[in-house]
Image: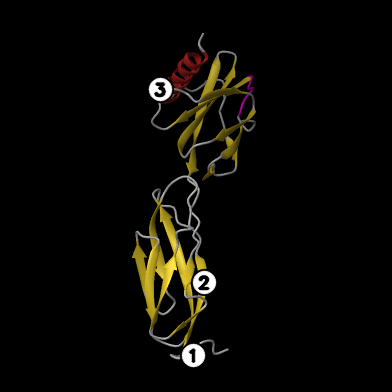
Amino acid sequence: MNMKRGQRILGMVLLGLILGGCTSPSGLRAVIATDPNPPRGPWPLSVTFDGTKSVGPVEEWNWVVFREGREEALATLSGPVVTYEFSERGKYWVYLEVRSGTHFHQTSVEVDVRSKPPEARFTADPYPEVQEGHTVTFDASSSSDPDGMIKTYVWSFGDGFWEETSSPTVSHKYTTVGEYWVQLVVEDDYGDRSSPALLRIRVVPKGCGSCG
């Protein structure tokens, strides 16, 4: 039998039994423990599924992995403890069927595989000093996202003003002498946000080159 077709048939049979609410009169009860718990995180996500806490005289542990929105099973596994690596973002369902002779019981667990967050980086010009009343241009073109696109740049200029842009560059005028921490957070097309990136800007009086 073709392996993919075999996976689909086995997966659909198990899924049909699960959705039909089949249980075993023998006292069998399928139980899934996961590591990590809960099973979620950025891809690639390796999850260990442990069925050893299942109740009853279990003789077989059969596992089926489905991705949400897809009919065919991604994998079928067997054994009391199995590990599977999820290589793409998405929601998945892992089903366990335990068997003893002709008796069986099923349960399932949802796995949430998330995108990797973007990374915020930026430069300033002039830097690190600017004279009061002058403008600093900030450039976040070096920010990156490993599995998507950066859609939004959220800037906090440290002086009470902030701005959200779709462009990686922005300019801001500083009107008061002092030191200001500029913060940038970027958001990607999955809605994931970066950790803040920070730069310190020193605003000096007009006519002052480097006032020490």
- The residue beneath circle 2 is 199
Q: Which of 99 and 120 is in front in this view?
A: 120
Disc 3 element? loop
Give the label, 3 or 1, closer to the camera: 1
Residue nearer the viewer, 21 or 46: 46
For residue 208, the mark is: 1
Spatial separation of the CA atoms under disc 3 and disc 1: 79 Å
Q: Is residue 146 visible?
A: yes
Q: Label 2, secondary structure: give it.
A: strand
Measuring 62% from the left and 25% from the top, which residue is drawn there? 56
Residue 63 point in image, percent of width and height: 55, 25
The magenta stretch is: 55-59
**Label disc, if present, on residue 82 of the rendered structure:** none
Q: Which colour scheme is used?
A: secondary structure
Give x and y (percent) for residue 159: 41, 80
Q: Does the magenta stretch include residue 111?
A: no
From this view, report whether residue 164 is shown above or below residue 53. below
- At 45% from the left and 24% from the top, the residue drawn is 18
Quarter of the picture containing the C terminus is bottom right
Q: Mark 3 points at which residue?
A: 20
Q: Is residue 122 above or below residue 102?
A: below
182 over 80 or under it: above or below:
below
